[in-house]
Image (tube, rainbow, N blue to C red):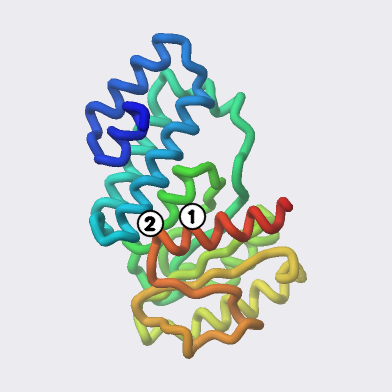
């Protein structure tokens, strides 16, 4: 395990940033550094699955990745590095203003190369549908924490179906108000209340789509 992967997987923020600068000063290409960062995130995922890390650690990991990618030395990578994943539209349903869970998975997806269109909270079905038509994502993420807002998930999926693009995308739903009883295959393609699992599902979908 190289130093950057080690620092990333230990969530050693200062050492990770310093190591990125050192590598770039030694003319290691940004894309190579990016791959090391992804390896570090993979190690973090393993620790989370093993119960060594918790949700708070995933938040820190996402913030660390975003901070590193925003470093001046890494910015040129944006023009050189092709999208390695896909496009995701994500939001919290109408009449629900909870943001934390959605924010975690959005940050994690962005950190590993997804283009994330975050619609925010209290998002109407019509806004989801407009975003699907505008951005043509491969994946839509729908979050719902309040049990009183559950019906808005179904109206959101129906609005997406009415765009005529439902067959071109996958829908993943999650949130504290939900469990598998609420969804049949025709209504949503996946359900999770685990941010890391959600990211893995999205990655697997993109691998299948690009196969």
Q: Secondary structure at mark 2?
A: helix
Is 211 situated above or below 158? above
**Horizontal and vertical percent position of residue 193:** 39, 71
Instruction: Identify which residue, 68 or 161, lies in the foreground.
Output: 68
**Horizontal and vertical percent position of residue 153:** 51, 79
Can you tell which mark lies on residue 103?
2
What is the count of numbered marks? 2
Can you tell which mark lies on residue 107?
none
Instruction: Identify which residue, 110 or 18, lies in the foreground.
Output: 18
CB contact under 8 Å: marks 2 and 1: yes
Q: Secondary structure at mark 1?
A: strand
Which residue is labeled 1 in the image? 118
Q: In this rendering, which labeled residue sits more in front, label 2 or label 1? A: 2
Q: Earlier in the sequence, mark 2 or mark 1?
A: 2
42 displayed left or right of 134:
left
Res 155 quadrant in image: bottom right
Specify few, some or many for label 1: CA neighbours under 10 Å numbering under 14, 14-19, or 20 or more: some
- Residue at image x 24%, y 33%? 13
């Amino acid at each position: 395990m190289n130093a950057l992967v080690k620092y990333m997987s230990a969530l050693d923020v200062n050492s990770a940033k310093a190591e990125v600068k050192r590598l770039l000063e030694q003319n290691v290409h940004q894309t190579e550094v990016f791959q090391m960062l992804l390896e570090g995130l993979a190690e973090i995922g393993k620790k989370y699955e093993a119960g060594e890390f918790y949700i708070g650690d995933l938040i820190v990991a996402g913030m660390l990745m975003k901070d590193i990618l925003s470093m001046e030395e890494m910015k040129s990578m944006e023009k050189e590095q092709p999208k390695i994943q896909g496009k995701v539209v994500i939001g919290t349903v109408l009449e629900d203003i909870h943001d934390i869970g959605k924010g975690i998975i959005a940050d994690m997806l962005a950190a590993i190369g997804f283009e994330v269109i975050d619609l925010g909270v209290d998002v109407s079905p019509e806004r989801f549908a407009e975003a699907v038509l505008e951005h043509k994502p491969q994946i839509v993420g729908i979050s719902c924490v309040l049990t009183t807002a559950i019906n808005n998930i179904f109206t959101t999926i129906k609005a997406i179906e009415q765009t005529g693009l439902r067959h071109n995308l996958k829908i993943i739903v999650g949130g504290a108000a939900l469990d598998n009883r609420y969804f049949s295959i025709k209504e949503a393609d996946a359900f999770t209340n685990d941010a890391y699992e959600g990211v893995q599902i999205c990655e697997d979908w993109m691998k299948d789509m690009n196969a």
